[in-house]
Amino acid sequence: MDKEELNENIEKTTPEEAELNTKSTENDNSDQEDDQKKVEPERNEVEKLTPEEELESLKDKLARTFAEMENQRRRFEKEKDDAYEYGGYSFAKEALNLLDNLERSKTALENDEKLKETEALKKIVDHLNIINKDMLSIFKKNNIEPVKSINEKLDPNLHQAMMEIEDDTKEPGTIVQEIQKGFMMKDRLLRPSLVGVSKKKEREDVKKDQKDEKN
């Protein structure tokens, strides 16, 4: 661009455009100065640290690093112990279905009218009982044991009430029937016991009043 073109462009620039260009340049310079002011205190702060202070800072960082490493080690140890203690949890939970099916088969055979009171049924039931006993023995060796239910007070952490049964001989909330046996694996619940709990018998006059209200 020669001098004539440069002069021509300057002449074409309006006073407003010239003012805007000047303000833009001033703003850019101001931003640069602000950034420089922010950096300078940080530099001064670093420069002001004494060797002793730098050493204390390094010690603090090192202590934090060791603390984090120790926390990670503890988490790893806990996960390893849980994997060792409860590694068969899912398998044990599925294996309970075998006991359920064994019990259902036994009940079905005992209720079969053609097999009742026969020697064949007695032999089959004896064999099923042996298998059931062996399975419970294997479970026990692996720290899997049945939840106590009958005559125990209902514990929501161990039992699930499925029905109420009128029984004045028991305290209300006492387990009087076990529908499905529950199991524990050490201190973990594999599944809750499904139970029936006792309740007080309703008096006949109360039942009559309830019936009249419905009518």
Image: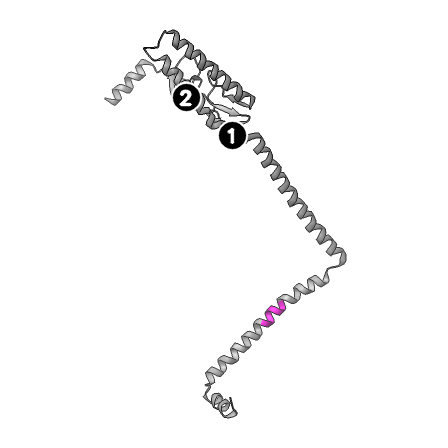
Q: Where does the magenta region start and end?
A: 32-37
- How far apart are the alpha carbons under marks 1 and 2? 20 Å
Location of residue 11 in the rendering, given as x and y in whole percent from the top left corner:
47, 90
Q: Are marks 1 and 2 in contact (CB under 8 Å)?
A: no
Q: Is residue 182 magenta?
A: no
Q: Earlier in the sequence, mark 1 or mark 2?
A: 1
Q: Using residue 93 as the reference point, say whether residue 36 is left or right of it.
A: right
Residue located beneath label 2 in the image: 101
Residue type at mark 2: give it. Answer: Asn
Q: Dot 1, how many residues are within 10 Å of its Cα: few (below 14), some (14-19), or many (20+)?
A: some
In this view, the residue farthest toward the left is 215
Decide if residue 195 is in sight here: no
Front-most of residues 207 and 190: 190
**SS state under label 2:** helix
Q: Residues within 10 Å of mark 2 (few under 14, many from 20)?
A: few
Residue 89, label in figure: 1
* Image location (x, y in percent) of residue 134: 50, 17
Residue at point 26% right, 22% down?
213
Instruction: Tell me what residue is drawn at x 40 percent, y 15 percent.
Output: 106
